[in-house]
Every structure is written in C-alpha cells, then in structure tokens.
Amino acid sequence: MADIYDTLVIGGGIIGAAAGLELTAAGYRTLLVERNDYGSGTSSKTSRLQHCGLGYLSAASGSIAAFLSRPRNAIECFSLMRRSMQGRAEFVHAAPERVKPVTFIVPLTKENAIPRWKAWLAFRLMAASDGGRVPLDLRLLSQREARAHPALQGMAGLDEIGGAMTFTEYQYQWPERVVVDAVMSARSIGMEALNHTKVTALTQEGGLWKATLADDLGSREVTSRAVVNCAGVWVDEMTALAGKPKLRRNTGEKGTNIVLRLPKALAGMGFETVTSSGSPFYLIPWGDLHYVGPWDSKSAGTPDGFCATEAEIYAILDQLGRLFPGLDLSRSDVLYSWAGVRPRSLAADGENTSPSVREHDLTEAGLPNFFTFTGGLLMTHRDAGRRLARAVGRRLPPSKPATSSTYSAPATQILSEVNQASIAYAVQREQAQNLSDILRRRLSVGWDSDLGLSKAHTAAQLAAPHLGWSSAETAAQLAAFIDETRREFGLNSEQNPALQA
Ligand SMILES: Cc1cc2nc3c(=O)[nH]c(=O)nc-3n(C[C@H](O)[C@H](O)[C@H](O)COP(=O)(O)OP(=O)(O)OC[C@H]3O[C@@H](n4cnc5c(N)ncnc54)[C@H](O)[C@@H]3O)c2cc1C
C-alpha cells in the first residue's frame, strides 16, 4: 500500500469505478474502497437501460413556449439529453459486448400523446447530439399501423391511440460486470482497490485526509490528499463522517422492478408508457422474460436492505392490469423482483429532488479537497468519471504521469460457465470473496432464470480451495447465497426447488 495516496475513492459502484479509472489514468495514485463488492449497490438494482435521453425532453411535450419560458430548466433538460446520447454512443462503441439493442414501442395515448412533428423534432435533436453515431431508428406509426401492431394487441384504449413510435434503446446486459471491468481496468494501470472493506472514519490532519478502513480482519488507517466520495445514496453519510453532518447533497428515491413471462407478441420487444401518475413505466425484455417497472416510492429512510415490498409488487401488477386488462396476471406470475434506492441530487431548496447529475467540490464548505458526486447514472458514468477527475485536477496535480489502460475483459464464454478455470480467475484475478461475488458479478450465471441457484453448489465446491473454506464454511457460504437470493429477489419458491430445501 502507498504511504500517501493522491485520491481515496469511496464506493465501488459504477460512479466510483469510472472515477477510479479516470483518476488513475490521469496519474493520480488512487485507492478505491468498497464496503461490499464492486457493483453490488444501486448499480445492480437498475432498469439496465442506456437511455437515449428522450425522457428529459418530456417536459417539452406540452407547450413549447411554457418549456422555454423557464430557460435554466430547459437548458438543463437539453444538456442531460445530450450527455445521455453521447454516453450511449461512447459506450455502445467501446463495449458492444456489454449492451444489446432493443426496439421499444411507445403508444401515443391520451397521457403521453405528442404530435408527430414534435416526436420527429425531438429525435432530430437527439440524433444531432451524438452526430448520428448510434442510430435511433425512429419509426412513427400512423393510427392504423399502431392499432394493428402485434405488441399493442390487448392494450386498454387501443381504439383511442393516436399512433405510436418505435425506436432503438440499448440495454446493459450486465451492469455489475461493467463495474467490475472498470475496476479491473483501473487496477491494470496501478489503482489499488479493496472490496469488502468499509470506510468507518474520516479526519483531516496536516492538510491530508486520514481514513479508517475496516474489514473482517480488523481496521487500519490510510492517508490521502483528496477524497472522492462516490458512495451513491450514502454520500451524505460520508460527509457526516468527515465532520459535516448538515452538508446534505443527496436524496434517495426507491424503484422496484418485477420479472414475469409476457405473451409471445411482446417477445424481445420493449414497451414504454407512463403510469397513471405520469411516471415512466417500462416492459423490458430479459431473455424470454420481461422485467416491468420501475415503481417509484419514497425511500424508507434507510437505503440498506434493498428489496421489493408486497405493496410495490402489487402496484406494478395493477399498472400492468390497467395497461393490458386481458393479461390476467396474479402475484404467483411474478418470478422475482428487485429494488434499489436511486441516488438523486438534492435541489437547491434542500428538500426536493433535482434531475441534475453533478460533482461537488466541498472545499469551500469546510472539507478541503473533498469531492462528492450526486445523481450518478449508469448511462453517463464515463462522463461522471471524467468530471470528477477534472474537478480534482482543479485542486491538485497528479503525482505520476498520465497513462492509459489496455485491459481487455475475459471472453464472454469464460464468464458464462462455472468451472475450475472461471472460478479460479474470479477469485485469484478479480478479488471475488464469496458466492455472490463469483456468481453475480464475475460470472453471469447468477442472472440465469434461476438466479444461479442450480450452479451454486458446484461453484461453492470449486471456490472452497481457493478461498480456504472448510466443508462447514462451504455449506455456510452456500446457505448465505440462497438466503441472499431469497431476500433480495423474492424468488418465487414454488418454481425453484433449490429454495424449498
Ligand atoms: C429501480 C432503478 C432503476 C434504474 N434504472 C436505471 C437505468 O435504466 N439506467 C441508468 O443509467 N440508471 C438507472 N438507475 C440509476 C442508477 O442505478 C444509479 O443511479 C447508479 O447505479 C448509481 O451508481 P453509484 O455508483 O452512484 O451508486 P452505487 O452503485 O450504490 O455505489 C455506491 C457504493 O458505495 C458503497 N459504500 C457506501 N458506503 C460506503 C463506505 N462507508 N465505505 C465503502 N463503500 C461504501 C456502497 O456499498 C455502494 O456499492 C436506476 C436506479 C434504480 C433504483
């Protein structure tokens, strides 16, 4: 370990991973610390979309004059849309194996009706934002075409829709692995990274930051010139640790998705509309299943223990029932669910949520060389990493020359199999420490339709010698993985024999 780091990155979600990579490449001697595993926080509980940013223009779907009459708001919406399109183009070109194009259909109903010319204009603006690098494939369907579209059959109010539009969105196949890829890429050029290690104290001493790190083996102190706080929905806890409990920048918003099997006419197709209260609502293909949501609700105060409540699951089923009354879905059709608490920027009024995605240099607020990121999203994570590296650069020069990573992720095939080689790679090369690390964030089998349960026993046996597990410890690790799967995903036990044992 270094005597003094240039930057201590707190949090190994998508934003911390991107920041760690950018800072290390810029020449900052960096330590990243994650209290669980890389990518196991909110970054693993999303709707997995690399959105094109259309939603940011929805404020202009009514009167354009009214939209433009609040110029600061309008500029913010355009800038967020532009960053989304640019993030989409950058990521689709850089990591095509981690994303998948999905055709989405949006019926133009009473709730989200926009005139065809406005839809056309919005897509022209979006295409111009990334120079047309990744096509949006907009198709505007007439009323007749929309009513005949197979994916819309059975939809409530089909006779009243004014038309529909289809376009291409990209879906992250596996956001957790995108986080791991970024951390491993940064390690390949010298970043140090510790998972399962928590920052428990932060103090200032002689112009430097001292952080106490705790893991299963005990605690120790590290020293750093700057702190880059990427703790997601927990960022304000970090500023509180650093001695400023009143310095709030974040607010949480819980979102839930459920997984079920929808009729064949929707196979492979995304569907986008709004809930009865006007929030975005998606049906997103997931293999031969769909996940549906998000259902947004107030965060219960503590962002820990992400999981869907029965009320949230029923609320999504209710929306689906309103949308497609003939589907006749019940609670037992829900195969599993997940939920997370979005980190959102706190608005200037200190109460409401702002859509903005931004870095905060807290030097003037009494925390010198302390940077916090709020509102971070998967879809613009590379931009977030660059913004943080630039913010640090305005205060501190790097101690080493800039470099760039030539890391390439292991082949997709090795990541989709549980065998001697894949487990050894996950543990020895990629810091996996338990079955969840191995099955969900190093290998993709944890996202098979049974969430990896059928392969967990074999994985535990293969991992045991690498992790020094006795047979009792191996059994305990397996039980912990099954318990986590049951708790976090509410997997339907009737359909999963491994959960009945
Ligand atoms: C339901 C839902 C749907 C979403 N859909 C999308 C989508 O489709 N597209 C999109 O772009 N975004 C989406 N998002 C938003 C996106 O997931 C998040 O905004 C993003 O993942 C946040 O990343 P992060 O790195 O800031 O946070 P996290 O991934 O939560 O990372 C923060 C990390 O900090 C760690 N940490 C906290 N305290 C400490 C400590 N004391 N010491 C060490 N580590 C600590 C945590 O363990 C955590 O891993 C969605 C979010 C939700 C909830």
Image (cartoon, rainbow, N blue to C red):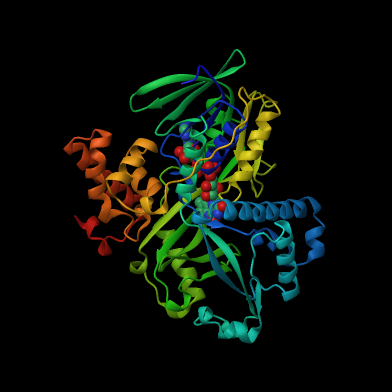
Q: How many marks?
A: 0
Residue 223 placement (x, y as % from top left): 52, 19
Q: Residue at x 42, y 47 (%)?
A: 410
Task: State the residue lying farthest toward the top.
Answer: 206
Is 187 situated above or below 202?
Answer: below
Q: Residue at x 65, y 58 (%)?
A: 53
Residue 153 placement (x, y as % from top left): 51, 82
Q: Residue at x 19, y 35 (%)?
A: 470
Q: Is residue 348 left or right of residue 177?
A: right
Residue 49 placement (x, y as % from top left): 54, 58
Res 248 visible? no
Choose between 95 and 173: the one closer to the eye: 95
Task: State the residue lying farthest toward the left.
Answer: 471
Is 412 situated above or below 430?
Answer: below
Is 492 situated above or below 396?
Answer: below
Choose between 245 and 413: the one closer to the eye: 413
For the C terminus, the image quarter is: bottom left
Q: Residue at x 51, y 30 (%)?
A: 191
Q: Is residue 444 left or right of residue 104?
A: left
Residue 101 placement (x, y as % from top left): 54, 64
Res 206 visible? yes
Is 23 situated above or below 282?
Answer: above
Choose between 320 and 213: the one closer to the eye: 213
